[in-house]
Image (cartoon, coloured by chain):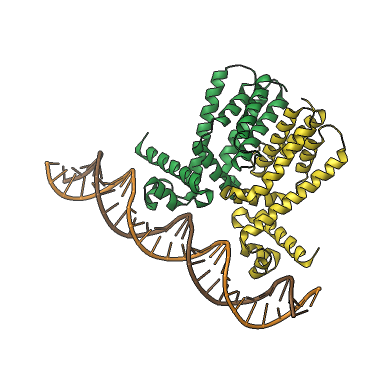
Chain colours: A yellow, B green, C orange, D brown
Amino acid sequence: MSAAGLAKTKILSAAAAVVGRSGAAHLTIDAVAAEAKLSKGGVLYHFPSKRAILEGMLDRLISRYSERISRFEAELGDEPDAAIRAVILADRGQDAEERSMALALLAAAAEDPELLAPARAVIGQWFEAVEQSSGNVQLGILLLLATEGLRFLDMLDLLPAGGTRREQLGQTLLNVAEAGRL
Amino acid sequence: MSAAGLAKTKILSAAAAVVGRSGAAHLTIDAVAAEAKLSKGGVLYHFPSKRAILEGMLDRLISRYSERISRFEAELGDEPDAAIRAVILADRGQDAEERSMALALLAAAAEDPELLAPARAVIGQWFEAVEQSSGNVQLGILLLLATEGLRFLDMLDLLPAGGTRREQLGQTLLNVAEAGRL
DNA sequence: GAAACTATACCGTCTGGACGGTATAGTTTT
DNA sequence: AAAACTATACCGTCCAGACGGTATAGTTTC
């Protein structure tokens, strides 16, 4: 990667770290600069505005998700319901950094939904893929919505019974998807 | 309702109106005061902090949801899967004001998830009710997660193909819940 | 029944801090 | 020499919350 690319990556990671430690409210350019061990000017050299940082985080999230989904789809080959299974698996592979970035974007998007336009496009593709590859389209859509629901509930700490519940439910979704029925 | 209760209601409606018009980012005490035709001091008399306003919005949101769910549950009596069907129906009855309040809370919660603690409790109750009243528990949970997913995706404008998609998908969920199978 | 007092419901102003962004001049790295 | 910074200073705006004051309707005291 180019030097500029490396710096951008470092800045985005720093932003995620700030959110992870202090919450989305404290995601400020100053805080990111301190975390990335750059000056404020240095950060603004690569990302000309705070919004650009958020857009960068979204880009990165989308890339990672897309990559994971492609990998799982390749693994599954032409097994039935490959699309929805790949989405569920990709969702499970979320790490702490992605979680932080998603939370930051959630906060920002509540204030300006247009920020998430690129995500809207990607989700549209998921819907299409699920509709095309599912033996039972209704079940596929249901699972896709449930996966997203699980993601948001988890992100906002709204799941009852805390920590393990998330994996349990994720496993349930995957089981149903693999069975292709209930 | 008492005079104080009326004032609080007015302030919360004003807050929702501000969010609906200007977005969650512009939900400030000043804006709420202007919308409610009070001074800033007047607003702070009833809600001692901005956070208290958000908590008030959450309270109100929860009350309305709970009321709708109870009503639908009563209507459904002991029909099968009453719990999940009531939740789906209640979700569909969301009006613009509730939507705005939910969006404001989403923004605030991304900065401080603990704000949503009361909601966590309520959602926990939904899970329990669905687990107990569903002929097929797995399907019930799946529908509950999908309902939440639909709510969040809609709230953030992440559903592809725009406006009507939300009702379509909601109807699908309801159909599946009524059939009790796919 | 008049005066004193209290509680409720506000109004208007002020302050202190946070933050996004700009500017500029110099330094290191490639 | 160009790119990639650093360091520092600064500006303008926004906003939460504090504070002191006002109006009024009831309640108590004498």
Q: Is residue B143 left or right of residue B14?
A: right
Q: Foreground: D19 or A179?
A: A179
Q: Residue at x 78, y 43 (%)?
A: A90
Q: Is residue B52 left or right of residue A108?
A: left
- Number of residue marks: 0
Q: Position of residue D2 (x, y in %)?
A: 74, 75
The quarter in which the C terminus of chain B is drawn is top right
Q: Position of residue B147 (x, y in %)?
A: 64, 32
Position of A21 relative to B117 (above/below) = below
Position of A148 relative to B45 (above/below) = above
Q: Foreground: C8 or A64?
A: A64
Q: Residue at x 64, y 68 (%)?
A: A40
Q: Is residue D15 left or right of residue A40?
A: left
Q: Residue at x 61, y 43 (%)?
A: B156
Q: Position of residue A64 (x, y in %)?
A: 77, 50
Q: Foreground: D18 or B38?
A: B38
Position of C11 relative to B169 (above/below) = below
Residue B3 seen from this side: yes
Please identify the residue farthest to the top as the structure is shown: B78
The quarter in which the N terminus of chain B is drawn is top left
Q: Quadrant of residue B158?
A: top right
Q: Quadrant of residue B140?
A: top right
Q: Foreground: C24 or B135?
A: C24
Q: Position of residue A48 (x, y in %)?
A: 64, 64
Residue A164 seen from this side: no
